[in-house]
């Protein structure tokens, strides 16, 4: 075993731990800001639509993207049910249920890490094969991971918009 391969095997768990630590603050109590919810509610469905249009020729990749988006939407729906909402003064706060969110984000990060390891192992082999961008992006695991993340975030953002619109207007402070 080469020294670089051994170093990679040691660094992978550390990298996963760092990604996890970076994700934790996103699932802490935070203020509900309408521009963030609107951005997520518009951006992620558009990204899903753009990905679906680019995958029209590949039925397996398109169905993987759709299955991932449906799974992500389902997880986003249940996350909204377990999210804690509160109103303090003239501000709205929420604390998302972190287990599903961290799971979805870590699955996406795991797929990115897997692609990196595949590229590294291919480069180190005696007979490296050509790996194109289309091969990586059209792979069913890539499509499921992206669909899961985008579906989850789109559903959560839309649910947060619906919650904010359902809130009664707050009285003006004197």
Image (cartoon, rainbow, N blue to C red):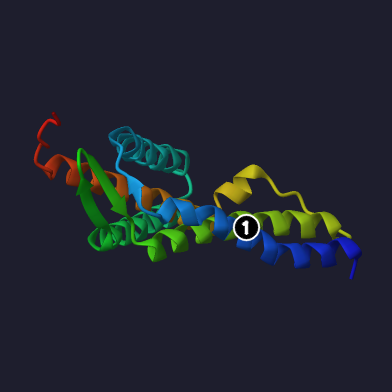
Q: Name the residue nearer the viewer: 156 or 168.
A: 168
Q: Is residue 88 above or below residue 111?
A: above
Q: Name the residue nearer the viewer: 58 or 161.
A: 161
Residue 174 in view here = yes
How crowded pointer 1 is (Cα within 10 Å; few <14, some 14-19, many 20+) is rated as: few
Q: Identify the residue at horizontal 35%, vertical 37% (top origin).
A: 36
Residue 96 falls in which quadrant of the image?
bottom left
Residue at label 1?
18
Return the residue found at the far front.
174
Query: Is 113 left or right of 122, judged from the image as shown?
Result: left
Q: Position of residue 117 (x, y in %)?
A: 72, 59
Residue 168 falls in which quadrant of the image?
top left
Q: Name the residue nearer the viewer: 45 or 26.
A: 26
Query: Is 157 left or right of 9, judged from the image as shown?
Result: left
Under circle 1, the secondary element is helix
Q: Position of residue 29 (x, y in %)?
A: 36, 53
Q: Name the residue nearer the viewer: 99 or 52.
A: 99
Q: Identify the residue at horizontal 13%, vertical 28% (top origin).
A: 174
Query: Is 151 left or right of 118, judged from the image as shown?
Result: left
Q: Position of residue 143 (x, y in %)?
A: 49, 53
Q: Identify the residue at horizontal 24%, vertical 48% (top origin).
A: 159
Residue 148 falls in which quadrant of the image?
bottom left
Query: Is 56 left or right of 132, judged from the image as shown?
Result: left
Q: Position of residue 133 (x, y in %)?
A: 64, 43
Return the residue found at the far bottom.
1
């Amino acid at each position: 075993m080469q020294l670089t391969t051994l170093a990679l095997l040691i660094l992978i768990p550390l990298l996963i731990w760092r990604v996890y630590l970076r994700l934790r603050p996103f699932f802490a109590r935070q203020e509900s800001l309408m521009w963030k919810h609107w951005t997520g509610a518009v951006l992620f469905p558009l990204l899903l639509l753009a990905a679906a249009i680019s995958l029209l020729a590949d039925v397996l990749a398109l169905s993987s993207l759709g299955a991932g988006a449906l799974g992500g939407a389902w997880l986003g729906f249940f996350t909204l049910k377990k999210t804690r909402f509160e109103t303090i003064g003239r501000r709205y706060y929420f604390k998302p249920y972190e287990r599903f969110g961290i799971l979805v984000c870590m699955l996406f990060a795991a797929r990115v890490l897997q692609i990196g390891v595949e590229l590294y192992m291919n480069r180190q082999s005696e007979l490296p094969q050509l790996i194109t961008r289309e091969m990586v992006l059209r792979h069913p695991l890539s499509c499921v991971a992206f669909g899961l993340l985008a579906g989850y975030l789109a559903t959560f953002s839309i649910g947060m918009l619906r919650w904010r619109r359902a809130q009664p207007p707050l009285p003006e402070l004197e």
